[in-house]
Image: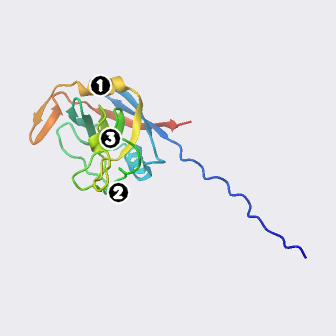
């Protein structure tokens, strides 16, 4: 009797995780950001949780450093920190680089301390990338529209406000951050 060999039915290929676009509406104009959930799943999920709750509405870019980055996502115009959820795992080893126009998570010296605050790189900031033995800052998306808005925010006059440095003299507000669509 001939031996029959059974072949397992072909499994459908795992669906690729699709990028997600969000629009960040600011008092200086709109920026569209393409998030990368395939390479930064924990970070994108965390960011979208804040987006879907409307957390960023009314917050400001509280740290603006031309030639480096603009930071927001945690402070009100009076420089009070808004309460956040629990910190997330650092995904800076995901292969994404801190290049001009990318968005990354702000954190403390503890690599796994990121919550809601983010920054947008104004230049290539290679020193912020992950290296062996030294976690970096987790990039999770990039601007696909509105780099002129990013540059306009970077050009505002800044000063010190209490213990905070590089604070815009005139607040730059985040009016809303909303999902646009699933990218095609």
Look at 33% across and 42% down and name the residue there.
Answer: 104
Q: CA distance from mark 1 to mark 2?
A: 30 Å
Residue pointed to by mark 3:
56
**Most foreground residue, 18 or 78:** 18
Identify whether 151 is placed above or below 21.
above
Local SS, label 1: helix
Q: Nearer the viewer, mark 2 or mark 3?
A: 2
Residue 27 visible (yes or no): no
Measuring from the top left, give residue 144's x and y in whole percent.
43, 30
Look at 88% across and 73% down and name the residue there.
Answer: 2
Q: CA distance from mark 3 to mark 1?
A: 20 Å
**Most foreground residue, 67 or 164:** 67
Residue pointed to by mark 1:
151
Residue projecting furthest to the right = 1
**Left or right side of 20 for 25:** left
Residue pointed to by mark 2:
89
Measuring from the top left, give residue 36's x and y in whole percent.
45, 43
Look at 56% across and 36% down and name the residue there.
Answer: 184
Q: Quadrant of residue 72?
A: top left
Identify whether 25 is placed above or below 82.
above
Q: Quadrant of residue 4?
A: bottom right
Q: CA distance from mark 2 to mark 3?
A: 21 Å
Question: Is the C-beta separation of discs 3 and 1 under 8 Å?
Answer: no
**Most foreground residue, 52 or 108:** 108
**Left or right side of 9 for 88:** left
Q: Earlier in the sequence, mark 2 or mark 3?
A: 3
Identify whether 144 is placed above or below 126.
above
Measuring from the top left, give residue 77's x and y in whole percent.
20, 36
């Amino acid at each position: 009797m001939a031996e029959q060999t059974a072949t397992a039915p072909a499994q459908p290929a795992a669906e690729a995780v699709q990028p997600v676009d969000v629009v960040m509406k600011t008092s200086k104009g709109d920026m569209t950001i393409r998030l990368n959930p395939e390479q930064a799943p924990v970070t994108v999920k965390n960011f979208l949780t804040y987006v879907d709750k409307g957390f960023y509405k009314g917050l400001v870019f509280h740290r603006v450093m031309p030639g480096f980055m603009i930071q927001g996502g945690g402070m009100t115009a009076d420089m009070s920190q808004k309460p956040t959820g629990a910190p997330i795992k650092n995904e800076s080893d995901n292969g994404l680089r801190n290049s001009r126009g990318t968005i990354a998570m702000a954190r403390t010296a503890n690599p796994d301390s990121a919550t809601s605050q983010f920054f947008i790189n104004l230049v290539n900031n290679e020193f912020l990338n992950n290296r062996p033995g030294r976690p970096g800052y987790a990039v999770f998306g990039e601007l696909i529209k509105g780099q002129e808005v990013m540059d306009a925010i970077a050009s505002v006059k800044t000063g010190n406000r209490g213990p905070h440095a590089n604070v815009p003299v005139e607040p730059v507000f985040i009016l809303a951050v909303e999902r646009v669509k699933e990218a095609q």
